[in-house]
């Protein structure tokens, strides 16, 4: 009978490049930047890595459709390597492959690395997709801001939130992320922005203004994982372990009939429920110490708080305005700046979120360090509110 992966895998080391408009670097440079930090942190030789997973989304833009750019850039010793893609959860998908390989006993050391070089596409937003059902939706005049603006409209309609209150709450989300990102030297945007500027910014898709949309960035992040026993044998006494890792993908129901009202993401609710069960989290509002969620747009972060069961349905906007998710609040969210300010190179984002949780749990987060965090949750949402993939990972200290 399946028992899950709780505490079967420890993170031996992690690395993250600086995110931003990295015009002078190619994808291989970013891979090396993240890997050098990760392998040094792990304290092993790269030739000890026995398998690798490579997460990248826009493969045709920079690295090609295989894992060869990873193995050749790092000169990995003829090991099995797999390129994975799952929209904005591609980095977490790479991590899942590495974690499952170690948990199964197939390998002792596995690498997960995600990268994206979006600024080289010559396009202001995300590059256009190829064949398939979801890209066809984008070609029908649907933009990412437009799709998530509809999430805001549906949320308002369901809970009777005024336009002014919703605007203030998503503005607070953006204000918080910019304040946090200002303390992060690896973040794309490192400048605090006042509320008046946020609220008066040009509208991209009502009610989303310029500062409510995540930036397009270049970057890479990686994790090297092993078993807790092996990590301890290498002298690692302070361990961060994987408590849960769950994914849920849409089955099409949301976009095919009216049982879904568009005000929430069903996949996030399902993945979160599974992850809490696997991690032994009885009450997320009580047990979680910090969150990194998929704030591609500020409204997405607000709605995700309810989908994760941290805020009650219809009350997330109040919790946001009350400062519940601020850096000095009850459960800080996006303490590193989030997608909004750290940036969103699609294949790297999931691993970047885990990198912040890892630093926080080990007390290495510098000026943004939280006080004795116990559990950290990361969340990715790929696609649109109507057709998507959600991934939830929970990290914590070894008991």
Image (spheres, rainbow, N blue to C red):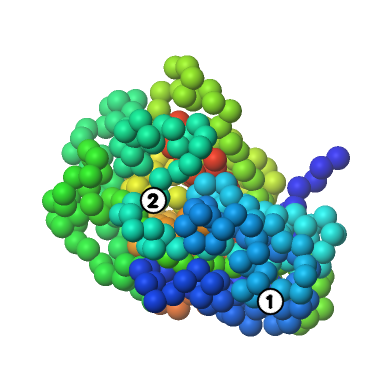
Q: Can residue 370 be seen in this view?
A: no
Mark 1 surroundings: few (<14), some (14-19) or many (≥20) residues within 10 A:
few
Q: Circle 1 sits in a helix, a strand or a loop, which is it? A: loop
Which residue shows up at 28% across the image and 50% down it? 212
Residue 97 visible from this viewpoint = yes
Which quadrant of the figure contains the C terminus? bottom right
SS category of the residue bearing label 2: loop
Residue 142 vs residue 282, the one in the foreground = 142
To which residue does mark 1 refer? 75
| Spot occupied by residue 167 in the image (x, y as percentages of width and height) | 22, 42
Vertical placement of 366 versus 132: above or below? Answer: below
Sequence-first disc among 2 and 1: 1
Q: In this view, does 274 lie above or below 113?
A: above
In the image shown, does 367 or 355 lie closer to the viewer? 355
Please state the horizontal and vertical placement of residue 57, each as a whole percent of the image. 52, 52
In front of the other: 55 or 271: 55
Residue 248 rendering spot, x and y as whole percentages: 60, 38
Q: Sort mark 2 into few (<14), some (14-19) or many (20+) by Cα contacts within 10 Å.
A: some
Disc 2, disc 1: CB below 8 Å? no
Q: Distance between the residues labelled 2 and 1?
A: 30 Å
Q: Is residue 185 left or right of residue 259?
A: left
Q: In this view, does 375 lie to the left or right of 174?
A: right
Say whether residue 113 is left or right of residue 289.
right
Residue at (49%, 19%) from the top-left corner? 256
Q: The N terminus lies in which quarter of the figure?
A: top right
Residue at 28%, 46% in the rendered image: 170
Residue on which the image places disc 2 = 126
- Disc number placed over residue 130 in the picture, else none: none
Residue 226 occupies which quadrant of the picture? bottom right
Please name the residue shown 31% across and 42% down the image: 145
């Amino acid at each position: 009978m399946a028992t899950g992966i709780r505490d079967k895998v420890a993170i031996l080391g992690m690395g993250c490049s600086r995110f931003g408009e990295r015009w002078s670097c190619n994808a291989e440079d970013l891979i090396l930047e993240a890997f050098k930090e990760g392998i040094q942190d792990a304290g092993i030789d790269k030739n000890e890595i026995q398998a690798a997973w490579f997460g990248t989304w826009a493969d045709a833009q920079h690295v090609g459709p295989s894992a060869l750019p990873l193995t050749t850039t790092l000169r990995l010793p003829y090991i099995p390597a797999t390129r994975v893609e799952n929209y904005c959860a591609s980095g977490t998908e790479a991590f899942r492959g590495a974690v499952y390989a170690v948990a199964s006993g197939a390998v002792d050391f596995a690498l997960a690395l995600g990268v994206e070089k979006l600024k080289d596409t010559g396009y202001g937003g995300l590059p256009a997709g190829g064949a398939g059902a979801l890209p066809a939706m984008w070609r029908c005049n649907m933009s990412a801001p437009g799709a998530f603006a509809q999430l805001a409209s549906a949320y308002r309609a369901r809970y009777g939130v005024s336009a002014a209150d919703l605007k203030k709450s998503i503005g607070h989300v953006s204000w918080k992320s910019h304040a946090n990102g200002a303390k992060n030297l690896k973040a794309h945007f490192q400048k605090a922005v006042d509320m008046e500027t946020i609220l008066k910014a040009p509208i991209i898709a009502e009610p989303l203004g310029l500062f409510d949309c995540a930036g397009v960035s270049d970057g890479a992040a990686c994790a090297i994982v092993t078993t807790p026993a092996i990590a301890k044998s290498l002298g690692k006494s302070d361990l961060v372990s994987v408590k849960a890792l769950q994914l849920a993908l849409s089955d099409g129901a949301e976009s095919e009939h009216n049982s879904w009202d568009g005000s929430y993401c069903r996949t996030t609710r399902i993945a979160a429920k599974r992850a809490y069960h696997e991690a032994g989290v009885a009450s997320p509002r009580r047990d979680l110490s910090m969150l990194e969620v998929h704030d591609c747009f500020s409204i997405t972060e607000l709605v995700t708080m309810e989908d994760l069961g941290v805020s009650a349905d219809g009350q997330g906007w109040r919790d946001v305005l009350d400062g519940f998710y601020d850096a000095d609040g009850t459960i800080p969210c996006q303490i590193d700046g989030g997608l909004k300010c750290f940036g969103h190179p699609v294949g790297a984002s999931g691993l970047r979120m885990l990198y912040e949780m890892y630093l926080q749990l080990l007390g290495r987060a510098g000026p943004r360090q939280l006080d004795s965090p116990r559990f950290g949750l990361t969340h990715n949402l790929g696609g649109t509110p109507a057709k998507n993939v959600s991934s939830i990972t929970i990290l914590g200290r070894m008991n």
